[in-house]
């Protein structure tokens, strides 16, 4: 399945479940995608994305052109194929781009990630669902037992708006231990310097107690004088 077109960009779409910082494969035991070696079965880089109708039409048209160009050289290929996009309830469309970790014995080049100013991001940069991105792909038309269509080979991603990575707890709320509210002095605007000043304030001694201390001191002084005689 040779590529027939390169350099197509899908602009201003929402990233969904991106796995570009390394190769991943689906683990049947864990029921999720897990990091893996490039030569493992099913190893690939992948990103799904959400697009509006206008962008979906643009991408669909480009995919059709790529397919027709390839089908024209293949007598056995169907003249057309069904639209593979998934339409969501909100009227947007979802599709995906991917790249195998290796083809035969050759490891593929990892998709490059850039920020909005075209600065290359670290190789392990973790893109997040909800981020706004531009995606560079190449088209690979195919006609096989699995079906007919055009796959999108992932080449690069430009991050326009980054959605912060959320830490999600796997638990429900429950009765029990909870961190007390307002435990920080900053929460209620407490002035640390005022607190320290209050701690330094001398303890007031009653007059009778003070007099008793003076008398006791005088007695001690007399004893010291007696030792000197």
Image (tube, rainbow, N blue to C red):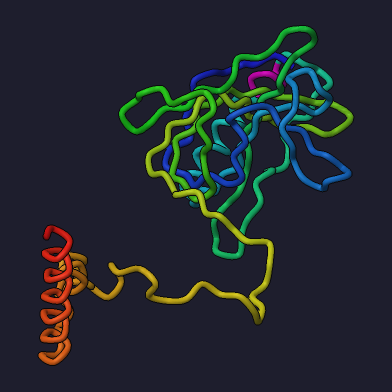
Residue 150 % position (x, y): 68, 30
Q: Residue at x 59, y 40 (%)?
A: 18
Secondary structure predominantly adopted by residues drawn in magenta: helix
Pick the front one: 193 or 13: 193
**As drawn, 204 above or below 116:** below
Task: Indicate left or right for 112 with 117 as reference.
Answer: right
Q: Residue at x 17, y 79 (%)?
A: 216
Q: Residue at x 13, y 84 (%)?
A: 210
Q: Quadrant of residue 104?
A: top right
As for residue 70 lying within the magenta part, the answer is yes
Q: Quadrant of residue 107?
A: top right
Task: Indicate left or right for 137 with 75 as reference.
Answer: left
As for residue 48 lying within the magenta part, the answer is no
Task: Indicate left or right for 168 with 199 as reference.
Answer: right
Residue 203 % position (x, y): 18, 79
Task: Indicate left or right for 79 with 202 as reference.
Answer: right
**As drawn, 228 above or below 161:** below
Total of numbered circles in the picture?
A: 0
User: Which residues fall within the magenta stretch?
Assistant: 68-72
Q: Residue furthest top?
A: 105
| On-image quarter of the C terminus | bottom left
Q: Residue furthest front?
A: 229
Pick the front one: 112 or 210: 210
| On-image quarter of the N terminus | top right
Q: Residue at x 56, y 23 (%)?
A: 111
Residue 227 % position (x, y): 17, 61
Pick the front one: 9 or 160: 160
């Amino acid at each position: 399945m040779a590529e027939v077109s390169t350099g197509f960009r899908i602009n201003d779409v929402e990233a969904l479940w991106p796995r570009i910082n390394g190769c991943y494969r689906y683990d049947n035991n864990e029921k999720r995608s897990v990091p893996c070696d490039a030569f493992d079965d099913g190893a690939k880089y992948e990103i799904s994305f959400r697009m509006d109708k206008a962008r979906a039409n643009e991408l669909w048209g480009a995919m059709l052109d790529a397919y027709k160009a390839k089908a024209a050289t293949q007598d056995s290929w169907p003249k057309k194929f069904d639209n593979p996009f998934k339409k969501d309830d909100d009227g947007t469309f979802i599709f995906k781009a991917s790249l195998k970790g290796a083809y035969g014995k050759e490891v593929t080049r990892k998709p490059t990630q850039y920020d909005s100013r075209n600065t290359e991001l670290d190789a392990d940069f973790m893109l997040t669902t909800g981020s706004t991105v531009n995606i560079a792909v190449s088209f690979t038309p195919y006609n096989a037992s699995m079906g007919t269509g055009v796959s999108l080979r992932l080449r690069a991603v430009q991050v326009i708006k980054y959605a912060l990575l959320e830490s999600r707890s796997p638990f429900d709320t429950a009765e029990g231990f909870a961190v007390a509210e307002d435990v920080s002095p900053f929460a209620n605007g407490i002035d640390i310097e005022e607190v320290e000043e209050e701690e330094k304030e001398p303890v007031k001694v009653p007059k009778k107690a003070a007099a008793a201390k003076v008398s006791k001191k005088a007695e001690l002084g007399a004893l010291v004088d007696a030792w000197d005689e």
